[in-house]
Amino acid sequence: MLTTNELARYQRHLTLPQFGQAGQEKLKTSKVLVVGSGGLGSPVLLYLAAAGVGTIGIVDFDQVDETNLQRQVLFQQIDIGKSKARLAAEKLKSLNPYIDVEVHEIRLTSENALDVLKNYDLIIDGTDNFPTRYLVNDACTMLGKPFVYGSIFRFEGQVAVFNYQNGPNYRDLYPEPPEPESVPNCAEGGVIGVLPGIIGSMQANEAIKVLAKIGQPLSGKILIFDALSMQSRIIKINRNKNAPVIDKLIDYEEFCYGPKTTKIMKEITVQELKSLQESGEDFQLLDVREPHEYDIANLNGELIPMQQVPEAGDKIARDKKVVVHCRSGARSAQAIQYWESKYGLDNLYNLKGGILEWARQIDSEMQQY
C-alpha cells in the first residue's frame, strides 16, 4: 500500500487512466537491476527512482572520469575519481527517500551474473560493450527475466525489450557479435551528449510499461532513433531458428574478442619511444585511433583506424621495429594481437599507456581528451 506521502508524491501517476494507484503499487513492489550507471544508466536510474520503483540495484565497478561528464548527468566535477555506483545510490536516495537502492560494486561476470540477477524482476543494460550485453542477455534468458536493451553510437540509438513473455532475445537479432575491429565503442567513435539521455529515458519508459503492465512494450521490435534527423523507425524481430540454445554462461570476452593469447605482448614505454626518436633509429610508428582523435593530438604516426586494421597488413613494415599506439593502449594491443595472429609478425611493440601517457610524462602541453 502507498503511504500518505507517496500518494502525494506520485499524484500525477495516480490520475493517469491506464496507470492509477494499481500501477503505482506495482512499481513500489518491483525490483529492477541497472547494469551500468553511465550515459544510459544515469537517466534510467533517475527516472526509475523518481517514478517510485521500490528497489533499484546498481551494478558498476567504475569511477567517475572527466570525460564522462559530457553525458553522464548523475555526476559532477567534484565527483571525479569517486565510485559511480555509490554516488548514484546516494543521489537516488536523495531524490526519493521512499525507495531502496542496492549497490553491486563489481564487474558482472559469468561466475556471478546469475546470483546477482536472480533477485530482480527486470534487468536494464546501460553498458557499451558486447561481452556484458551478451552476458546479460544469456543470464536473463536462463532466469526468465525481461531485459531492456539500449545502445548508442555517435548520433544513433536503439531500444528494445528482450525475453519478455517468451518473446525474442538479443541473440535472435544478433546470434554472433561483430568483428571486434569493425565496431568502435563510444570512446573511439564518439557520441553526442544528449543521445544517452534520450535513449535512457526510452529504456526507463519501457521498464515502467513492463512493470506496471501498461501499453505495448517493444518486445519483438527494435526502435532505431536518429538524433540528426529526429526520425525513428521500428523494425520487427522474429524468433531466429538458427539462434543458439542458451543453457549455460560462457567466457564472453573470448566469445566477442577471440581466444586469449598466451604470448606476452612486447611493450615500449613513452620514455623509450622518446629515446628511440632521438637516436635516429629507423622505426615505424602506427596510430590506430580515429581521425578526429588524431586531429586533437598526435605523435606524427601513420593513421590506421581500427576499422581498417584487417586490410592494413601490407602497410606494416617487416624489416624494422613497429610501435603501435592509441589513446591508452587498449586498441593498439587489440590491433597487435590481430596482426600477430594473422601475419605471424614478431616486430610489433605496444606503446604502454598510449598518447595519454605521452602527454603526462613527456609533453605536458599536449591536448588530452
Image (cartoon, rainbow, N blue to C red):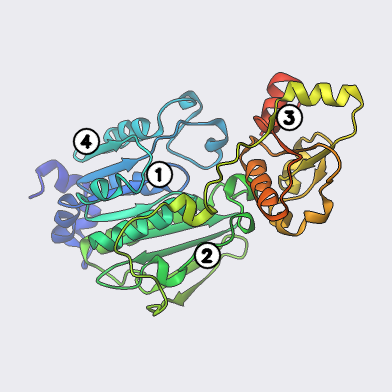
Quick check: can you spot residue 365? no
Q: Residue 189: x and y, percent? A: 64, 50
Between disc 2 and disc 3, whose residue precedes? Answer: 2
Residue at which label 2 appears: 225
- Label 3 amino acid? Gln
Q: Which of the marked residues, 1 or 4, is nearer the chain's N terminus?
A: 1
Residue placed under numbered mark 4 in the picture? 97
* Nearer the observer, 183 or 330: 330
Question: Which is nearer the N-term, disc 1 or disc 2?
Answer: 1
Identify the mark nearer the N-term, 4 or 3: 4
Label 1, secondary structure: give it: loop
Q: State how far apart marks 1 and 2 are (Cα).
A: 21 Å
Considering the numbered disc 2 on the image, is that residue within a helix, a strand or a loop?
strand
Q: Identity of the amino acid at label 1? A: Gly
Q: Are marks 4 and 3 in contact (CB under 8 Å)?
A: no
**Label 2 – label 3 distance at C-alpha:** 33 Å
Is residue 169 in view?
A: yes
Q: CA distance from mark 2 to mark 4?
A: 34 Å
Q: Is residue 105 left or right of residue 336?
A: left
Distance in Å between CA atoms under marks 1 and 4: 22 Å
Look at 36% across and 44% down and name the residue there: 108
Instruction: Count residues near mark 4 (Cα–Cα under 10 Å), then give few for <14, some for 14-19, many for 20+.
Output: few
Disc 1 versus disc 2: nearer the observer: 1
Residue with the mark numbered 3:
367
